[in-house]
Image: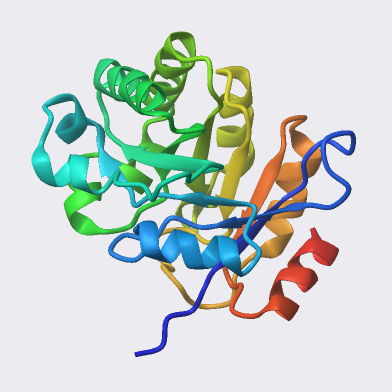
Amino acid sequence: MLIVFIYIFVMMPVNLRSRPWVFAAPLAGVSDWPYRKIAKRCGADYAFAEMVAAEGLVRNNLRTCELLTRYPGENNIGCQLFGTRPEAVADAAVMLQGMGFDSIDLNCGCPVHKVVDKNGGAALLKDLPLLEQIVSAAVKKISIPFSVKMRSGWDAKHITFLEVGKIAEGSGAYYICLHARPPTEPFAPEVHWDHIRQLKEAVSIPVIGNGGIRTAQDALRMLGET
């Protein structure tokens, strides 16, 4: 079986790093602690645990909690949440901060039906007032960075990444990750890296580029183009 390590770049403020950070993206069913340990050995600066449901976490669901297992001494680790109730996402964020996670990410990009059918993941791109409420509620309750992972828009006819990016920034998000495709184009056709460049020019917080990176050369090309 071939597993492709998907890296995403973030341009941090120049006084914090001499080069862009390299993140190992969260992947359901893949980014458990052995994966993250290997990714760090290969040079990843930061990694994410698998996406978990805020509702499952606040209810102490056993399977949800198992997804948060870390290896001894693991640092520079974030956790990605999906959810639609601002109170649940905020409470889950508080729990994750207490567990020692370094940052928390709100998933607004997952195209999987069982997530979208509950109005989570990419479905939040159709309800921007709710998205704003969720980010604001979580940011007010935690002291670690809270970020937003999103797609370019709900579909090719509704490209809203600039609007969503400004909402995320205005609500207190620490940075934004953009998978530069709509969910109707999960992994094809070609990713729209120009969206990443446009978003970076439109907001003052850091932007992570995601999508279409299969090799180190792809990552360098994305950095150059965005």
Task: Give the side of residue 87 with respect to residue 166, left or right.
Answer: left
Q: Quadrant of the C terminus?
A: bottom right
Residue 4: % across, % down? 48, 79
Q: Is residue 31 visible?
A: no
The image quadrant that residue 29 belongs to is bottom left
- Number of disc labels: 0
Q: Residue at x 64, y 65 (%)?
A: 192
Eyeballing the image, is 41 above or below 161? below
Q: Quadrant of the N terminus?
A: bottom left
Q: Name the residue nearer the viewer: 195 or 67.
A: 67
Color encoding of the figure: rainbow
Eyeballing the image, is 145 above or below 108? above
Q: Name the residue nearer the viewer: 133 or 58.
A: 58
The image quadrant that residue 31 belongs to is bottom left
Task: Give the side of residue 201 with respect to residue 174, left or right.
Answer: right
Residue 120: % across, % down? 28, 40
Task: Give the side of residue 141 with respect to residue 50, left or right.
Answer: right
Q: Residue at x 42, y 81 (%)?
A: 3
Q: Residue at x 27, y 43 (%)?
A: 52
Residue 135: % across, % down? 45, 22
